[in-house]
Image (spheres, rainbow, N blue to C red):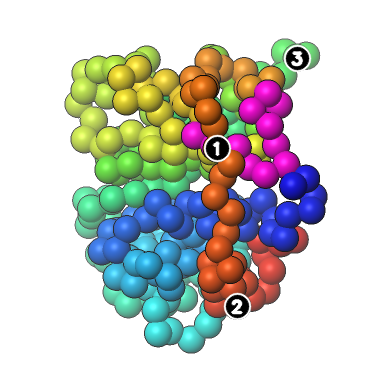
Amino acid sequence: MPANEAPWSWPELAAVILSRELADHEVGSPGGSRSEIPLAAARLAQLTHAPNLAIITSAAGFVANMVGKPWSPLFHSTMDWRNVYAGTEAVLPSSGVFHTRRDWFFAGALQVDGYGNINLSRIRLKDGSEMRGPGAAGLAYSSTMARRFFIYMHEHSRRSFVETLDYRTAIGFGDGPGSRQKLGLRGGGPALVISPRGVMDFDERTLRLRLRSVHQGQSVEELVDNTGCTLIVPRTVPWTMPPSDQELAVLRRQVDRGGVLRH
């Protein structure tokens, strides 16, 4: 099926795929600015298979769950006060926000390398100048401490998937096996990378990026050609499992009635 004929948008597909990775009774954070995809994923998980999932919506420590709550619109940033207060059940003291358990975290990236390290700081341009990104905020902390984290990329090209980052904002698996342990990091590292072309995870032995599935309308060849870092490609690569009728209905009727993920 060509990508432009799919009955869902790329952000909707990403939110559904990521929601499946979240389990009941877990606690995590969707991230900050431009975090509508992970926030939608967490809310969708709560309303489908993980009713006891807790979302820490911001560094201010608002803990939210949308189950049984009045519908609240989805906005682009988790830091938007309308998202912060939606479904809030508790507020953590500021002194405890960064000591609270994190089973998962979401991170966007300007660049990601083959070990899941992230650049959100700056990119070197061909003319020698640099483009500044949003920076680290809580990313450096969360990537080191969360039990696992998920990376979502709005672009899949050789300038976004690179062999060497222009700047390392947050660590994934560092330089390979043993890197996180040498640094004394408690978290487990990146679990998944999702892009408009496919889904990637990490090889258990080498910790290198590995292709898990390609989206409908894409091909393995196109994805590999647009990847600038070493990518493990299994002999057989399945299609990404599409949203079910239930997932799409809940996403559109309860999570994103305003169509933020479709615009």
Which dot marks residue 253? 2
Q: Residue at left 55%, top 37%?
A: 238
Residue 68 rendering spot, x and y as whole percentages? 40, 85
134 relative position to 137: left or right: right
Callout 2, which amino acid? Answer: Arg
Residue that label 1 marks = 238
Which quarter of the image is occupied by the C terminus? bottom right
In the image, 20 versus 181, the foreground residue is 20
The range drawn in magenta is 212-223
Q: Where, by quadrant of the figure, is residue 180 drawn?
A: top left
Picture coordinates of residue 212, whole percent (x, y):
49, 34
Q: Is residue 115 above or below residue 11?
A: above
Q: Which corner quadrant of the image does residue 190 belong to?
A: top left
Task: In the rendered structure, find residue 136 and report the number of the disc placed on it.
Answer: none
Question: Which residue corresponds to the image point at 33% horizontal and 34% vertical from the top-left?
Answer: 189
Identity of the residue furthest to the front in this view: 236
Residue 66 in the image: state x and y as whole percent: 42, 76
Q: Residues within 10 Å of mark 3 (few under 14, many from 20)?
A: few
In the rendered image of this protein, does residue 12 appear above or below residue 208?
A: below
Front label number (3 vs 1): 1
Image side of residue 238 versus residue 98, left or right: right
- Is 227 in front, or is 79? 227
Q: Which residue is mark 3?
A: 126
**Magenta stretch contains residue 213:** yes
Q: CA distance from mark 2 to mark 1?
A: 29 Å
| SS category of the residue bearing label 3 | loop
